[in-house]
């Protein structure tokens, strides 16, 4: 009986510690996580990683924000959750205050479209939505194009912010 009571107390203490630790995590408004792309066709999968990489690089190119490493974003992503819930969980697991959700879809037989949204998870709002289209032969250019467009929607960082 004493062992069970001790185990329950230890379990409760660990749970309380974890809850307080998780609640105290503040999201970093200068950190952006690019979620894995939602794909509209299986044949787009081989290009998805490079599009995600280029999207992250283009969003962060001007400085001011930095990207969560792709491996960390992929491991923190829950593909079974609804997009809004998955974005929130991605932000909480990576501490990113900004999340990019993007979809890559075929348009006809020879073109593709990338739709990307920049979310400010801390304030529960969409900062911008952009769309880029290209021929399938040039689909790798979509990440750079959409990322550059999203960069214009980044919130202005105050000079008092520190890393």
Image (tube, rainbow, N blue to C red):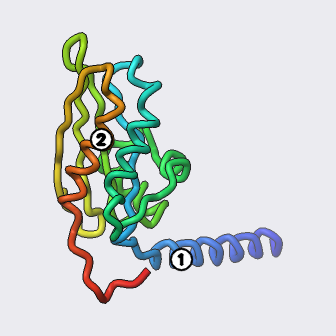
Residue drawn at x 37%, y 37% as measured from the top left: 37
Q: How many marks?
A: 2
Residues under numbered marks 2 and 1 in contact, where contact means CB atoms less than 8 Å apart: no
**Which of labels 2 and 1 is toward the front?**
2
Determine which of the numbered discs, if any, sits on residue 56 in the image.
Answer: none
Pick whichever, 43 or 85, lies toward us: 43
Above-or-below relation of 128 to 22: above
Q: Residues within 10 Å of mark 2 (few under 14, many from 20)?
A: many
Q: Which residue is mark 2?
A: 102
Q: Quadrant of residue 67?
A: bottom left
Image quadrant in which the C terminus is located? bottom left
Q: Quadrant of residue 17?
A: bottom right
Residue drawn at x 39%, y 44% as measured from the top left: 54
Q: Residues within 10 Å of mark 1 (few under 14, many from 20)?
A: few
Determine which of the numbered discs, if any, sits on residue 21 in the image.
Answer: 1
Residue drawn at x 44%, y 36% as measured from the top left: 50
Above-or-below relation of 144 to 9: above
Residue at disc 1, secondary structure? helix
Residue drawn at x 25%, y 42% as measured from the top left: 145
Specify whether 83 is left or right of 68.
Answer: left
Residue at disc 2, secondary structure? strand
**Residue 23, horizontal then vertical, whole percent:** 45, 75
Above-or-below relation of 51 to 71: above
Specify whether 60 is left or right of 5.
Answer: left
């Amino acid at each position: 009986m004493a062992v069970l009571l001790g185990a329950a107390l230890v379990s409760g203490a660990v749970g309380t510690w974890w809850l307080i630790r998780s609640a105290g995590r503040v999201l970093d408004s200068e950190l952006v996580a690019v979620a894995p792309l939602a794909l509209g066709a299986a044949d787009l999968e081989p290009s998805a990683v490079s599009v995600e990489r280029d999207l992250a690089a283009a969003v962060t190119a001007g400085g001011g924000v930095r990207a969560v490493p792709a491996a960390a974003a992929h491991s923190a992503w829950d593909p079974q959750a609804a997009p809004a819930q998955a974005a929130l969980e991605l932000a909480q697991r990576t501490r990113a205050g900004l999340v990019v959700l993007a979809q890559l879809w075929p348009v006809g037989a020879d073109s593709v479209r990338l739709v990307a949204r920049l979310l400010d998870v801390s304030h529960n709002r969409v900062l911008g939505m952009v769309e880029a289209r290209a021929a399938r032969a040039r689909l790798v250019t979509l990440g750079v194009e959409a990322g550059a467009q999203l960069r214009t929607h980044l919130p202005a960082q105050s000079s008092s912010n520190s890393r």
